Image (tube, rainbow, N blue to C red):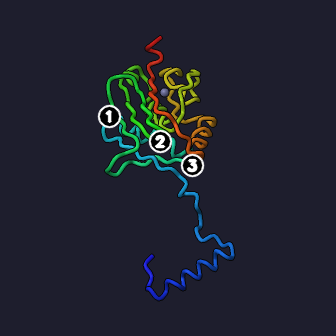
Amino acid sequence: MILPRTLRPVVGLFIAFLLALGVPVVASAAPENVRVVTYDAGQSAEFRDAVDAGAKVWNDNVQNVKFEPANGGAADVVVLADDGWPRTEMRGLGEGTVWMGRQAVNEGHDTIRIAAHELGHILGLPDNRTGVCEDLMSGASAGPTCTNSKPNPDEIAEVERNFADGVRMAPRLFTEDVLALR
Ligand SMILES: [Zn+2]
């Protein structure tokens, strides 16, 4: 806010007056607490729409963190495509590299579920291979017929806690080729 020099002390006094009364000067502090995680899907080839959809799934389900497309500069998350199994190299909470692997897609796994699952690793969730389709982090263990891309309530709560507490996470590689290794 640009104010004429003569008005500045007046405005300052007014704000001091409001603070003395206990009137909240900032209407809502909540949006400032949301951690924005930028992602670059520009190198994810045919999976770009699925990556956007996977990011939207999280944006629709959690409050404390928000994925936004990176506008130039370095993104917190870079999404790539290759012919292997999907995987995520998490460098820390909200940072890393995701590979949208074509091998899983060729075996029939849903691309939006893959994207949401891998972004779940970026948000600090580990694999939980229950074979249950309602669990997003069950990943490929739920089989290729599972197209659920929504996190379950426990997964949502864990992400909210991670970002509310700003937990520090050690770098970790999550690979999805569990079925191939059997
Ligand atoms: Zn995984």
Q: Amino acid at mark 2?
A: Gly
C-alpha separation, residue under disc 2 versus residue under disc 1: 24 Å
SS state under label 3:
loop
Rendered residue at 32%/34% (across/down): 46
- C-alpha gap between disc 1 and disc 3: 29 Å
Task: Give the percent coordinates (x, y) of residue 57.
Answer: 50, 41
Which amino acid type corresponds to the residue marked 1 in the rendered image?
A: Glu
Q: Which mark is on residue 124?
A: none
**Dot 3, how many residues are within 10 Å of its Cα: few (below 14), some (14-19), or many (20+)?**
some
Mark 1 in CB contact with mark 3 (< 8 angstroms): no
Q: CA distance from mark 3 to mark 2?
A: 14 Å
The location of residue 111, given as percent across then percent down, is 42, 31
Residue 125: x %, y % from top left: 54, 33
Q: Residue at x 47, y 44 (%)?
A: 56
Q: Which mark is residue 94?
A: 2
Count residues near mark 2 (Cα–Cα under 10 Å), then give few for <14, some for 14-19, many for 20+: many
- Local SS, label 2: loop
Q: Is tag 2's residue or tag 1's residue first in the polypeptide sequence?
A: 1
Q: Nearer the viewer, mark 2 or mark 1?
A: 2
Position above or below: 7 against 109: below
Instruction: Report the residue marked by disc 3.
Output: 63
Marks 3 and 2 close (CB-CB < 8 Å): no
Q: Which mark is residue 46?
A: 1
- Camera-side residue of 160 and 168: 168
Residue 48 is drawn in which quadrant?
top left
Q: Earlier in the sequence, mark 3 or mark 2?
A: 3
The percent position of residue 38, horizontal first and vertical second, equals 41, 47
Left or right: where does residue 66 sit relative to residue 20?
left
The mark closer to the camera, 1 or 3, is 3
* Quadrant of the rendering where the N terminus is positioned: bottom left
At 45% from the left edge and 46% from the top edge, which residue is drawn? 37
